[in-house]
């Protein structure tokens, strides 16, 4: 396999920068950027702007200022070779006459996974694939897409705010507000960047949240297409029909996940009120979590921000479905043996059995500390 040069690496880094501009509008598609070079100069650039729109390679080709035949295409993700809402990018690359294609990372989708690269090689085009740190960065850019492509389930990011002594609520259940204003504003930005946000029925009953993304302090500051799907795990369908999620001004979809034990009259009432009702199946809570994620994935949800409460978060942990953790640590001490902790799960018997994070980062957000831990990489 041919190796990439330092020059190639710089162009691939540019494709990653371009790809990141796509933001949440591309979901459920991946973030992709492309650069076209001829004689050491950039003659075209592009990135995938939104799902259903032209892919990065086509955007770059359309922007080109010179003849493309014999040029080099740099792209952050393996070019697609299947017909979806847009034609295969491999066709556009072949027709443009590129001599060389340099790729930062693979596409793990069943309809891709090296097929696009094979097609280009069969056409006589030199194909070079990056490895090492650059390829890892490209994969990290598309973790929701990659998990969904491999498992059919969304990437799950667990978020919580806790005190210095690890409590998320006092012994009476009060939790507003442990984190500071800056932290809460950041959470709304995370919601806007997620396909779905989820809470358990306990949180829904205690807080009566809207679960919308209020960036800039208002729902109206975002288009409805940027609002996350709101998901409430409610095994017995106890969500009141007067809950604020039913009067959402942002127009984002509401999904209620129930179990087979939920009364039919209650689930029918939820559906009549406008909720999409999913029935999670399985012999235990962990199996029902996986069933729910399978169904959400089938709806096109590739990323889910899990906001609690502790019991639901614990079920996700026990199910092996927490991919990233984001914990705000506030400068508070709550105490209390009955005060709640972030994860109420079965847990492990031995420290040696503990789930160990792959990475751990820390930053200051207003008066809080934000800990970010990546648990799995896809």
Image (cartoon, grey):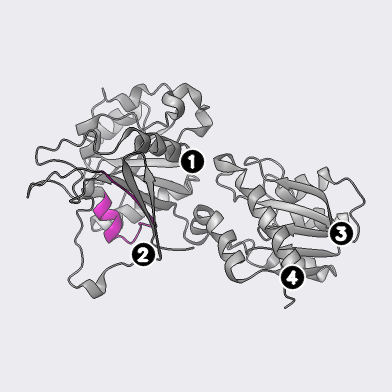
Element assignment for label 3:
loop
Q: Position of residue 132 (x, y in %)?
A: 59, 71
Q: Foreground mark, 1 or 2?
A: 2
Query: Which numbered circle lies on residue 71?
Result: 3
Side (left or right) of 197 relative to 146: left
Element assignment for label 4:
loop
What is the spatial separation of the Cα atoms under label 2 and label 4, in whole angstroms?
32 Å
Q: Nearer the viewer, residue 10 or 306?
A: 10
Q: Position of residue 98 (x, y in %)?
A: 85, 60
On the image, numbered disc 4 is attached to which residue?
Answer: 5
On the image, numbered disc 1 is attached to which residue?
Answer: 193
Q: Which residues are magenta?
A: 313-330
On the image, numbered disc 2 is attached to which residue?
Answer: 357
How many residues crowd around disc 1 within 10 Å: few (fewer than 14), some, or many (20 or more)?
Answer: many
What is the spatial separation of the Cα atoms under label 1 and label 2, in whole angstroms?
23 Å
Query: In which quadrant of the rendered view does residue 271 lie?
Result: top left
Which quadrant does the N terminus fall into? bottom right
């Amino acid at each position: 396999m041919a190796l990439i040069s330092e020059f190639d690496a710089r162009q691939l880094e540019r494709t990653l920068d371009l790809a990141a501009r796509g933001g949440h509008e591309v979901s459920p598609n991946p973030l992709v950027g492309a650069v076209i070079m001829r004689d050491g100069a950039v003659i075209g650039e592009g990135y995938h702007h939104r799902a259903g729109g032209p892919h990065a390679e086509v955007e770059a080709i359309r922007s080109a200022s010179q003849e493309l035949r014999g040029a080099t295409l740099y792209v952050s993700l393996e070019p697609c070779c299947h017909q979806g809402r847009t034609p295969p990018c491999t066709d556009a690359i072949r027709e443009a006459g590129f001599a060389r294609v340099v790729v930062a990372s693979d596409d793990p989708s069943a309809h891709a996974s090296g097929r696009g690269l094979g097609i280009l090689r069969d056409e006589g085009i030199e194909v070079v694939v990056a490895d090492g740190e650059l390829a890892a960065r490209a994969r990290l850019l598309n973790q929701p897409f990659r998990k969904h492509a491999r498992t059919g389930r969304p990437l799950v990011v667990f978020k919580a705010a806790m005190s210095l002594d690890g409590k998320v609520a006092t012994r009476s259940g009060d939790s507003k507000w442990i984190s500071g204003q800056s932290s809460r504003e950041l959470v709304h930005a995370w919601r806007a960047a997620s396909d779905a946000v989820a809470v358990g029925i306990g949180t829904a009953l205690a807080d009566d949240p809207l679960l919308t993304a209020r960036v800039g302090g208002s729902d109206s500051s975002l288009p409805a297409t940027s609002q996350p799907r709101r998901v409430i795990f409610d095994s017995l369908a106890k969500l009141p029909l007067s809950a604020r999620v039913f009067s959402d001004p942002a127009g984002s979809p509401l999904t209620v996940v129930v179990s087979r034990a939920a009364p039919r009259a209650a689930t029918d009432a939820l559906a009549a009120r406008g909720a999409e009702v999913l029935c999670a199946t399985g012999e235990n809570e962990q199996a029902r979590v996986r069933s729910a994620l399978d169904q959400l994935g089938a709806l096109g949800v590739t990323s889910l921000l899990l906001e609690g409460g502790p019991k639901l978060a614990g079920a996700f942990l026990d199910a092996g479905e927490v991919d990233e953790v984001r914990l705000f640590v506030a400068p508070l001490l709550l105490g209390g043996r009955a005060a709640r902790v972030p994860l109420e799960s079965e847990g492990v018997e031995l420290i040696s059995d503990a789930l160990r994070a792959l990475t751990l980062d820390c930053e200051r957000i207003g008066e809080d500390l934000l800990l970010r831990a990546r648990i799995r990489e896809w």
